[in-house]
Image: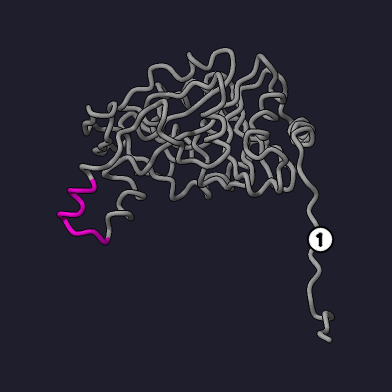
Amino acid sequence: MRSHANKTIRPVRTLVTKGRIVRDLRQLGVEPGQALLVHASLRSLGWVVGGAPAVVAALRDAVGPAGHVVVPTGTEANSKSSRAHQAHIATLTPDQVDQFHLEMPAFDRLSTPSGMGAISEALRTTEGAVRSAHPQSSFAAIGPEADVLMADHPLECHLGPDSPLGKLNKMDAQVLMIEVEYWAFTGFHLAEYLYTPQPPMRAYAAVVGAEGARRWEEYEDVVLDDQKFDDIGKSLEKKVAVKRGRIGHARCRLVPLQPAVEFAVEWMAERRR
């Protein structure tokens, strides 16, 4: 007979229900009527009954009919310049790269899946959700002014003042971070547009258009660099009130967007040249 003496007994995690998520959101500080920008890892929550759609439903319940839930639905690989794209073509020959570019599917606001995880995709595909039209840095939203938030997302403004992120900043939105660190805090990118009158610029390209009419769009926008975002986040928490707690089994933060952006603007103005 085999001995089981050395086996480690792992505790069984309880199932996470929609109701529990709503209660945990309330305890963290989410209130009815808020605009909530969500960065989330579904897996970190534990075994959620109903999966990502149940999380989206809980978020909607927590902010109520007057509130908004917004997620990034970016498609980083739809680019000739992104890290994801460069990694994909790194081992291809020049001819293979050209062929790959010819075959890359164009971004379609209505059908291109989110590249930002299961909760993001679940919200994008929820009835009533509206998505912005940027081919690399889109957002999706649910709420009474979702169409206004997502409208007119300029190609030359990934995450700047005229993007949905800029609009959320003016709405005094809160950023919900579910088991993600500050490297994923999109709000710091808005600060990259604001910390100096003439931020560094670079060339971008993305493939857009409906099937049969695809084309590459080339444009200039601000250089986006998240390498020091974790450092900014650590400093931020010494100055700005950040709420911490758990939703399901995930460690979470609730961060006020506008003060975070203002702090990042000052941080970058002092340290970036």
Q: Which residue is located at x 73 percent, y 48 percent? A: 249
Query: Mark 1 Cα within 10 Å, few/some/many (few <14, many 20+)?
Result: few
- State whether residue 20 is above or below residue 233: above
Q: Amino acid at mark 1?
A: Pro
Q: Is residue 188 left or right of residue 64?
A: left
Residue 93 or residue 268, whichever sits in front: 93
Q: Is residue 267 left or right of residue 93?
A: right
Residue 30: say if magenta: no
- If the image is split into quadrants, where does the N terminus sit? bottom right
Q: x, y percentage for residue 256?
A: 62, 30
Quadrant for residue 239, please give it: top right
Q: Which residue is mark 1?
A: 11
Q: Which residue is located at x 38 percent, y 22 percent? A: 153
Q: x, y percentage for residue 25?
A: 73, 33
Q: x, y percentage for residue 20?
A: 79, 36
Q: Which residues are magenta?
A: 91-100
